[in-house]
Amino acid sequence: MRAIARIIDHDSDYRSTVAAEVDEQRVGRAGWLWLTRPDGWEDELDRLRADADADAAAASDEREERDARRRLAAARAAAERATAAATAREQEAAEIRADLVEERTLRRALEARITALETDLDAARDERARAIRQLKQKEAVLARRTEEAKQTVARLKELHEQPRSTDSAVTEPDPASSLDPAALVDGIQAAARRANELIDALRDLEAKAQEANRGTDGAPLSATADASDPDSCDDGPGDWPQTPTRRLARALPGGIRDDSVEAVEHLLRIQGVVLAVDGYNVSMTGWPDMPVAEQRRRLVLALGDAAARTGTQVEVIFDGAEVEPIGLPRSARPLVCVRFSPADVEADDVLLDLVSQLPASRPVVVASSDNRVRDGARFLGANLVHARQLVELIRR
């Protein structure tokens, strides 16, 4: 194309020939001026070129403007999307903050509730301790009243059976004759009423203690009282090794009923067995008409004899502080440990805590007729015998 343009530009005849073959409409005004070259054609051609350049520049500006508008529209759309996303995130953040405030409020309410429950629990424990103390006091009063009533009845029998003197020279009055039978009957009935009232009070206190006990967390007690004979209690529960396995109650041979004395005899002859005795529960079963101290003494001595006979390790637990030492035969001292529960702690809890701390591989027999003790001992895998069974065995 450049070569043709040079030829046409330098050959006027050829230009004339080409111009004769085309017209201005086909080649445009600039092409027609270049072919025909009238006077002033160069100036007009320059103007046309300038106009074309201006039109091209305008078109370029228009394109750039359109492009800029498109880019601006895209940027605005992106900004709107970003704004919407930011708004959504802000709303989500606001919801999270609201949830956090609600959670903190709930947590504070739960903390307040826990504090209130802990306060109630402490109050329940205090009430339980007071009920236990009152129960022990009522038991002591009842024991004294029972002893006084028995002494009164014995004295009345003694006075009634005492033969009257036939010696007319004896002028001393007969003590029995000075007694008013109606007054004595009234006194005995009043004592019986007081005893019944004490029994009712004991039952009420026991119910309160059980109710307070249900309100506690049921944590096992770790403390036990000192034994009456330190030499017989060297192996305390805290010194026994612990094992992770669960204790299993030992099965009885066929033909032996679990409520028989033979069952107790068999269990106490198992190698390494420990007999845990609910002290007053068994002593009151065996010697209900005797003073508490005498009940305790007789039970410990009888357990010493049984331990010496069977080789059984015996742990007997009584409520309350130790009141007097109990002398055991030398042969029974290594086998019998007498424990008293600490202040404000029931012997039931000490006994169950002792059983829980014994190695699971060591067989344990628990002697009690108290349902709470039996349920706890059964859960710990111990064999159970009633107080009556043990009393029958140790009386042989």
Image (cartoon, helix red, strand yellow):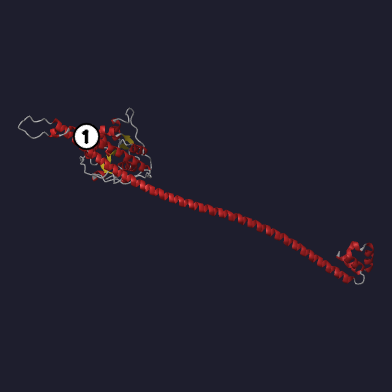
86 with respect to 308 (left or right): right
Q: Look at label 1 and name its amino acid.
A: Asp
Q: Quadrant of residue 212?
A: top left
Q: Is residue 349 visible?
A: yes
Percent coordinates x, y for residue 339 in the rendering: 27, 43
**Residue at horizontal 61 percent and vertical 56 percent from the top:** 87
**Residue at horizontal 32 percent and vertical 35 percent from the top:** 384
In front of the other: 9 or 188: 188
Q: Quadrant of residue 19?
A: bottom right
Residue position for label 1: 186
Outermost residue toward the top in this view: 255
From the image, which quarter does the C terminus lie in? top left
96 with respect to 261 (left or right): right
**Residue at horizontal 46 percent and vertical 51 percent from the top:** 109
In front of the other: 219 or 331: 219
**Residue at horizontal 93 percent and vertical 66 percent from the top:** 15
Percent coordinates x, y for residue 278 in the rendering: 29, 39
In front of the other: 191 or 259: 191
